[in-house]
Amino acid sequence: MRLNNKNPAMRRYLRRLAISMLLYMAFLFIALRYVDAVTGPLAYLLGALPGIAVLGVFWAIGRLLIEEADEYLRMLLVRQTLVATAFSLSIATVWGFLENVKLVPHVDAFYIAILWFVGLGVGSLVNWLTIGDSGDCK
Amino acid sequence: MNNRLKVLRAERDWSQQDLAERLAVSRQSVNAIETGKYDPSLPLAFRIAELFDLAIEAIFTSPSKG
């Protein structure tokens, strides 16, 4: 990631990203430690906590798209997220059909989010290859 | 889109960073516009034109004439 600390939108994004990742680690620890000790709605809540923290990352990227005042950097970010979406959905869709006919093993759905984050890197590479500028968000 | 931004900037002895700060955009934006990799929005094109005290068409070449 090109850390442009003069860019206030990027500074806010990095702060939100760091908070989300810290919450993710804390929530994952809590969920794994206590989910077997509870039942009912509380078990669902505990089990969902790490995922909810990951939603914070999606939210942070969404806010960056809204708050980035530089139209060129915003365009790079839009392209990057579109590539990430295409990348993750394409793999998830094909994998799902292969899984349906039992040609590949089952993969937990949260890996789609991981694929999307990998896709941000692919999007950055696509930007670099096509425009010569990778953008700010990785 | 072809443009005279680099020439106009050089005439004033401004770096890309100088121009970026005057336009309140990133240096990458100035570079992308100068090299024709990115066409600015109409509001940004007006900001550029007003900064150089020129008409937009005196800076940017229409693609149909370019």
Image: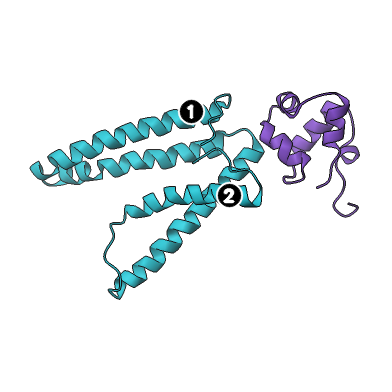
Chain colours: A cyan, B purple
Residue A49, picture quadrant? top left
| Label 1: element kind | helix
**In this view of the protein, which residue sits in the foreground, A41 or A105?**
A105
Return the disc, 1 or 2, that comes first in the chain's sequence. Answer: 1
Question: In the image, what residue occupies the spot 27% across and 36% down?
Answer: A25
Amino acid found under the numbered disc labelled 1: Arg
B51 shown above or below A21: above
Residue A112 x/y as whole percent:
37, 54
Q: Mark 2 points at which residue?
A: A79
Chain letter, disc 1 residue: A
- Mark 1, residues whose alpha carbon is within 10 Å: few (<14), some, or many (≥20)? some
Q: Residue A12 carries which label?
A: 1
Q: In this view, does B48 lie to the left or right of A4?
A: right
Q: Are marks 1 and 2 on the same chain?
A: yes
Instruction: State the image quarter where residue A16 is shown.
Output: top left
> Which x, y percent locates residue B44?
75, 35
Please tell me whether mark 2 sits on a helix, a strand or a loop: helix
A133 left or right, relative to A9:
right
Q: Alpha-carbon distance for marks 1 and 2?
A: 21 Å
What is the chain identity of the residue bearing mark 2? A
Image height of A36 relative to B15, above or below = below
- The structure residue drawn at horizontal position 62% and vertical position 32%, both measured from the top left corner, is A69
Query: Which residue is drawn at the image coordinates 42% and 62% (left, top)?
Result: A91
| Number of other residues with Cα within 10 Å of mark 2, as a class: few under 14, some 14 to 19, many 20 or more | some
Using the image, tell me which numbered label, if any, was put on residue B3.
none
- Give left or right: position of A137 versus A113: right
Amino acid type for the residue under numbered disc 2:
Arg
